[in-house]
Amino acid sequence: MIEFVGEGVEIRPERYAVVRVRNLPNVNCVAIVKGKDYEVVMPERELVKLEKVNEVDTGYRLLKLDINVPLDVVGYISKVSSAMANAKIPILILSLFSDLILVKEEFLDRALEVLKDLGFRVRR
């Protein structure tokens, strides 16, 4: 069973955007996924550097789950995403060596409560 007691959550202070662009921008970013277009998670303040945007969604806050789990652990993200779904909080998850959750700012406080209920310590 996966327990999160004492694990941390770091809230990044800036707001983020999820952007779809044809050409890879020269911006600071959290993640880039290449498909037909580039899908980029980036700080909103960097949006002014983009020339042409196909799609943009703004107003996200980034939560970094400060937990050390092997990359082959099964069910860890499912437990977090299920708790968010049960609370009717839409999220975007980026799982790499660090697990990041993007949540719209209007859901931030509720998302933090869900994480606290799971046992996470929230660091502002």
Image (cartoon, rainbow, N blue to C red):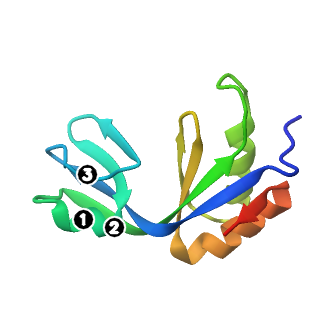
Q: Residue at x 74, y 53 (%)?
A: 8
Q: CA distance from mark 3 to mark 2?
A: 13 Å
Q: Earlier in the sequence, mark 3 or mark 2?
A: 3
- Residue reaching furthest top? 72
Q: Residue 94 in the image: x percent, y percent? A: 51, 43
Question: In terms of depth relative to the viewer, which is nearer, 98 or 74?
Answer: 98
Q: Amino acid at mark 2?
A: Glu
**Disc 2 residue crowd, few under 14, some 14–19, many 20+, Cα 10 Å:** some
Viewer-nearest of discs 3 and 2:
2
Question: Do residues under tags 3 and 2 come within 8 Å of each other at their CB atoms?
Answer: no
Which one is in front in this view, the residue at disc 3 or the one at disc 1? 1
Q: Which disc, if any, is residue 20?
A: 3
**Residue 84 in the image: x percent, y percent?**
68, 58
Residue at image x 69%, y 47%? 66
Helix, strand or loop for disc 1? helix
Contact (CB < 8 A) between labels 2 and 1?
Answer: yes
Q: CA distance from mark 2 to mark 1?
A: 5 Å
Q: Hey, what amino acid is under mark 3?
A: Arg
Quadrant of the frame with the C terminus: bottom right
On screen, residue 116 above or below 96: below
Circle 2 residue: 44
Q: Secondary structure at mark 3?
A: strand
* Neighbour tally class for label 1: few under 14, some 14-19, many 20 plus, Cα within 10 Å: some
- Residue 47: assigned label: 1
Q: Is residue 74 above or below residue 47?
A: above
Q: CA distance from mark 3 to mark 1?
A: 12 Å
